[in-house]
């Protein structure tokens, strides 16, 4: 509670949450949505390819999108901090902690996919191992959970 009270007294909180200008909060939330589109959209596209969609697209070149996903994640982390400064009381919301947990699990599955799938020398030959497909499916579920929980913080658990 002391931390939340402290954040609410900062100039950044006042500027983001109480600014007479119309743009700070909408700008941050728009960037957050765009960053999420990059990291989650690209990750889910790769997951779907691992699960067998668009088999005519070679999987190996998709590894080039990992740096793009990390840029999207960086945008999301930065804007997420801005959003938390605007509403620090969300740290007390149990649904927010579900979001954080799902995000962490999604990022772990992303790292495991990179390690297990894209290090395979025979990547484009034959079906992928079941573990790779399970990781891809779990990744989609974790991102869906993170996004859903993030939206639900406005309605549940305050």
Image: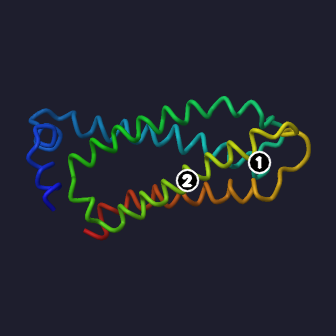
Task: State the image coordinates of residue 114 (x, y, percent, origin top left).
Answer: 68, 42
Q: Residue at x 55, y 58 (%)?
A: 142
Viewer-closest of 107 and 28: 107
Disc 1 crowd rating (10 Å Cα; few below 14, some 14-19, many 20+) is: few
Question: 68 left or right of 96?
Answer: right
The residue under label 2 is 106
Q: Residue 53: give its label.
A: 1
Q: Residue at x 18, y 39 (%)?
A: 16
- Looking at marks 1 and 2 on the same chain, the residue that comes earlier in the sequence is marked by 1
Task: State the image coordinates of residue 118 (x, y, percent, origin top left).
Answer: 74, 39
Q: Secondary structure at mark 2?
A: helix
Assign the C terminus to one quadrant of the image.
Answer: bottom left
Task: State the image coordinates of residue 96 (x, y, percent, origin top left).
Answer: 35, 61
**Vertical side of 93 occupied by 49: above or below:** above
For the residues bearing labels 1 and 2, Cβ distance under 8 angstroms: no
Task: State the image coordinates of residue 109 (x, y, percent, origin top left).
Answer: 61, 52
Question: 82 left or right of 148?
Answer: left
Q: Residue at x 15, y 38 (%)?
A: 12
């Amino acid at each position: 509670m002391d931390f939340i009270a402290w954040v609410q007294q900062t100039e950044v909180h006042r500027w983001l949450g109480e600014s007479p200008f119309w743009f700070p909060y909408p700008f941050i939330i728009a960037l957050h949505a765009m960053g999420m589109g990059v990291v989650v959209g690209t990750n889910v596209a790769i997951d779907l390819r691992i699960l067998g969609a668009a088999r005519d697209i070679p999987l190996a070149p998709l590894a080039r999108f990992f740096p793009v996903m990390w840029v999207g994640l960086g945008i999301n982390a930065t804007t997420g901090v801005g959003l938390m400064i605007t509403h620090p009381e969300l740290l007390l919301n149990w649904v927010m902690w579900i979001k954080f947990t799902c995000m962490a699990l999604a990022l772990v599955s992303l790292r495991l996919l990179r390690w297990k799938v894209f290090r395979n020398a025979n990547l484009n030959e034959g079906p992928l191992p079941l573990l790779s497909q399970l990781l891809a499916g779990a990744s989609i579920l974790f991102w869906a959970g993170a996004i859903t929980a993030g939206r639900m913080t406005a309605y549940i658990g305050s």
